Image (spheres, rainbow, N blue to C red):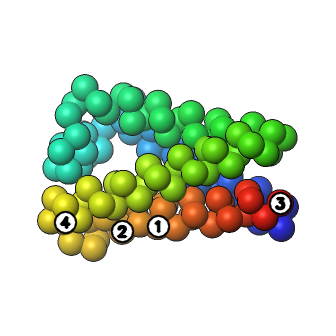
Amino acid sequence: MTIALWIFSILIGLASTMSAMGKFTKMESTVATLKSVGVKEAQVPLLGALELAAALGLLVGIWVPILGQLASVGLVLYFATAVVMHIRAGHKANGFAPALILTLVSLATLIFQFAR
């Protein structure tokens, strides 16, 4: 179980870090997608900070389980909210598939966190 936890934590941690970097650098496609779901440009860095904090929480959570659990809960909520925002904006499945996949990986990580 520990190996699965590490693998899933690393996967979602890297994905969150890459997503955060897209927000911090204000990558054109990232900002356009966020605007299309109703996020204001001033909120973009905050979303990146939340993702980066969660990624760091997962890393530290390897040794401090409560931080890993809290970070996993945060990521599930973050990415599930992203899916809902895409659906509310009328995006088709291919528009919110990445957020859905990240929600599922976050959920698996959360399950592994609590099963340790």
- Disc 3 packing (10 Å; few <14; some 14–19; many ≥20): few
SS for tag 4? loop
Q: Give coordinates of residue 69: x percent, y percent.
A: 68, 49
In the foreground, 55 or 73: 73
User: Which of the two discs, 4 and 1, labels the residue nearer the N terminus?
Assistant: 4
Q: Earlier in the sequence, mark 4 or mark 2?
A: 4
SS of the residue at dot 1? helix
Real-space CA distance between mark 1 and mark 3, rounded to the nearest whole angstrom: 23 Å
Q: Position of residue 17 (x, y in %)?
A: 53, 41
Can you see residue 15?
A: no
Q: Are there few (<14), some (14-19), or many (20+) residues within 10 Å of tag 1?
A: some
Residue under the image location 23 percent in, 65 percent down = 87
Q: What number is the disc on residue 97?
A: 2
Q: In the rendered image, which residue does mark 1 sit on?
A: 101
Note whether 56 is above or below 10 in the view shown: above
Residue type highlighted by circle 3? Arg
